[in-house]
Amino acid sequence: MASGLPVFYVRPRSTAVKVGIIGYGNMASAMLNGLLAHGTLSPSDVIVSSRTLSRMAPLVERWPEVEITTDNGLAARTSDLLFICVRSEQVPAVMNEVRPSLSPSGHLVLINGGVSISDIDSAAPVSKVIPSITAEVGRGVTLVHHRDDVGPEERGRLEDLFSSIGQVRVVDEGRLDAGTCLTSCGPAFIATIIEHFARSAEGRGYTYDEALVMLTETVLATASMVGTGRSPSSICGAVATEGGITEKGLEVMRRDLPALFDEVMDVVLGEHVRTGRALRGDR
């Protein structure tokens, strides 16, 4: 690659550091449960802070050794690797709260696509990570970007952590937004396609549930073919015969899908820009 950055790799290795997580929404839950389930993290090495204790009840039930708190400062003080997993508009307030507790020898990780690393005032080195909810099943792609002050040891430790629950791609920060649309937003977009495709079979001989089972297996099988090196166009060519029923369906999709996905990408990227400007107070 021209940038000299690694593309995909899998390099699993467990970590022996104390990991703190501030904010426990859907993404933090998927990320943490994936890391714990794959043995990358030990529950006793994790502290999670959330203003709502009830949100963490399922976590404690499954992993009773995980420490929970409502004190963000405590999580910051006791962690070597601290993940900030709150909404974009909450990041400035959380940073003001935890900054006095951060150790310069620690490592701060921002799990948020709407906040730029340049907006983070921290003596500790900072990385930005965009995980996927699919981390919960040990699959998917995690995007990573490091600030210049993140050393080789810290880089390797963070990348190793996420390589245990999928693939890791290290990218420049300017490429994170488009990548987020593919890898982090992507599961929702793909699930929506699956849902509506399955719904189209209702009233045509199948129930939604029956269609969903068949379609899900077809999606998994097709993705596996692409994963082994088959290009999407070669799969289409192998299925569709000239003038056949598949070709007729593809004509509709090729007519409508390019504009649809361009619009989806434009909306997502535009929202990233809007959020960043709002947080910086840009006019």
Image (spheres, rainbow, N blue to C red):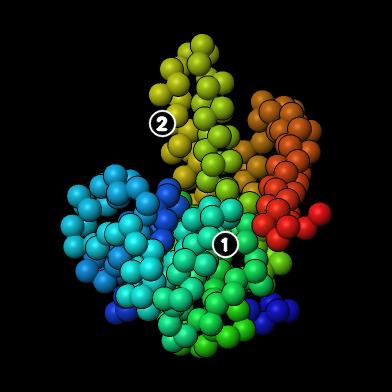
Q: Which residue is mark 2?
A: 213
Q: Residue at x 39, y 71 (%)?
A: 76
The front one of 256 and 163 is: 163
Q: Residue at x 54, y 74 (%)?
A: 127
Contact between marks 2 and 1 (CB within 8 A): the answer is no
Which comes sooner in the sequence, label 2 or label 1? 1
Report which quarter residue 63 is drawn in. Answer: bottom left
Residue at the farthest top position: 203
Report which quarter residue 102 is drawn in. Answer: bottom left
Q: Secondary structure at mark 2?
A: helix
Asked if 116 appears above or below 283 in the picture, the reply is below
Report which quarter residue 259 is drawn in. Answer: top right
> Where does residue 88 sit, x and y in percent of width and height?
58, 55
Amino acid beneath label 2: Val
Q: Residue at x 41, y 31 (%)?
A: 213
The front one of 228 and 63 is: 63
Which numbered mark, 2 or 1, is in the foreground of this view? 1
Report how far apart the C-alphas of labels 2 and 1 lie in the structure.
44 Å
Q: Report whether residue 240 is seen.
A: yes
In the rendered structure, the answer to whether residue 260 lies left or right of residue 143 reads: right
The front one of 185 and 151 is: 151
Amino acid beneath label 1: Pro
> Where does residue 130 sit, x and y in percent of width and height?
54, 61
Where the C terminus falls, by quadrant? bottom right
Asked if 194 appears above or below 182 in the picture, the reply is above
> Where does residue 270 sit, x and y in percent of width and height?
74, 49
Q: Residue 92 got which mark?
A: 1
Q: Report whether residue 226 is seen.
A: no
Where the N terminus falls, by quadrant? bottom right
